[in-house]
Amino acid sequence: MTYDLAPPKAVGMVASLSSLGYSLPDAIADLVDNSVSAEATLVDVEFTWEGPDSWVAIVDNGAGMSEDSLVMAMTVAARWSASDRTSTDLGRYGVGLKSASFSQCRLLTVCTAQGDGHWTTRTWDLDIVEETNEWRLLREPPAEAKKVLDTLTRGRSRGTVVLWQRLRGYGHTSASDTKTQRGFYEEIAKVSLHLGLVFSRFLAGSSALTIRVAGSPAHPWDPFLSSHPSVRRLPEEKLPLDGHLVRVKPFVLPGQQRLTPAEAEAAGGPKGWLRQQGFYVYRRNRLILPGSWLTMRGLRREEKYNLARIAIDIPAETDVQWQVDVRKATVVPPVSLRLHLTRIAKSARAEAAKTVRHRGRISARQHSGDLQFAWKVDRPSGTVRCRINREHPLVQALLQEGTAAPEQVRALLRLLEETVPVSALRVVHEPDTADDPEPFGGPGAASKEATEVAQHTLDLLLTQGRSHDQALKTIRSMPPFDQLAGFWSN
């Protein structure tokens, strides 16, 4: 056998690791994985603005590392997924610490102690790596890092500190740049929300993990509303995969009429109801994929399936079959499970759609006395049907012989044009869209046309024997005037 050794160049490898597509919340979550694996009970994510000297640090009270373990942790791809890992290890390829950090900074320092107060440090300075084209792992931190580390390790005897300096995107700013400073600190809320989602099972479970971002605790987000009495749990299934079991647990969330406004807003999650439906893939209790139908054929996001959410727990030993990527952010379902997952998804989606339709019928019965809708939408025999509401005051007036006037006809036609029941049609038939028309230009002050239609409606209500106050109350409850401000407003 003849061969050449062709090791990757340090400069090219750094550039590759820095370009894996991490967002700041994703990168920090990757480092919190290491803290969880080290059995930390407290993780602090610190942000400090100092212009080009700004820094971010992840500090935990975990078991810490020996010097040899630290060097291995700082070495790119020192471990493969088949290496000796504990059952709580959230790692994958052994590149997360480096790739996540290099995507955000050019000076990475890790400082660790195992309980004796002796802190061991190693630093990657990418300026030196690029200048020498060698993997020179510094044994002593540069002065700019040492000052911060002294503050972060003071009073601690164990744990690990990951310090990011020379942050990407801030190299040419100044400490007095208030606009950039505001953007820097706005990342705090995004990071906290993301960590509460990804590590929700750890934050809410028996592990007693606490994550603080800039001093405030990250709160767990339960996408399945597990503690709500109205959530429906469909039968759990355990699907075999290469000697392991994949657990699939479908949930149908309660309709929003069973939720308080605060519960409904929280249940919508960071991306909103439509984008949070679907599968939630967990690996060792760590969320990898939040809300996706996994690009499987015949499954697409539609509003009528908003209440369908399905938890999938995949064994870490099946990472290859699921094609878990370096960032632990995407998965591809194994071919052998796709039919089963599609079947489970369709069943959950059907139950969710029933709940949505049932909610619509209840809502119509509850509010029909107050809200005079211009349209009635239903689906008899599986066919969508739209009918003009004969009980609407404008329609009733026109149906009475000899009372119709051109102004009234125009007012009714304009009202019908502006209140086409797009949302109701979407629930029973069509996929969701982001460009639903807004009647008379949307909520806010009423336009001249809207005011004219409302005035004709008021006149008709008065001629039908209602008092002025009763007529105004009816208009205030009538779409679209319930979303517009005009003479009928309180």
Image: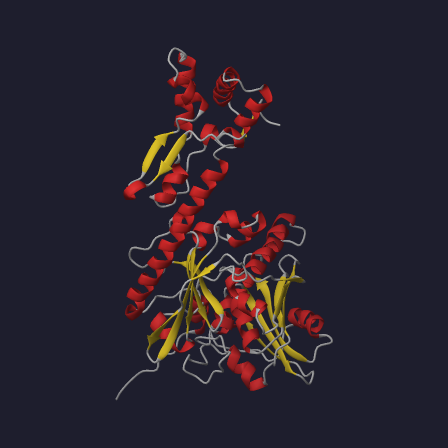
Identify the residue at horizontal 33%, vertical 41% (top origin): 379
Q: Hey, which quadrant is residue 334 in on the image?
A: bottom left
Measuring from the top left, give residue 407's x and y in whole percent: 43, 14
Q: Position of residue 423 (x, y in %)?
A: 41, 39
Q: Is residue 395 above or below residue 368?
A: above
Q: Is residue 270 left or right of residue 213?
A: left
Measured along the vertical axis of the image, is residue 178 above or below residue 248?
Answer: above
Where residue 213 appears, as percent x and y from the top left, is 63, 62
Image quarter hosting the N terminus: bottom left
| Foreground of the two, 13 or 321 | 321
Residue 6, visible in the rendered structure? no
To which quarter of the image does residue 32 belong? bottom right
Q: Is residue 47 above or below residue 318?
A: above
Q: Determine if residue 51 is in view.
A: yes
* Image quadrant where one finds the C terminus: top right
Towards the viewer: 109 or 255: 255
| Corner quadrant of residue 322 | bottom left
Look at the picture and state if 82 lies above or below 480: below
State left or right for residue 484 relative to residue 291. right
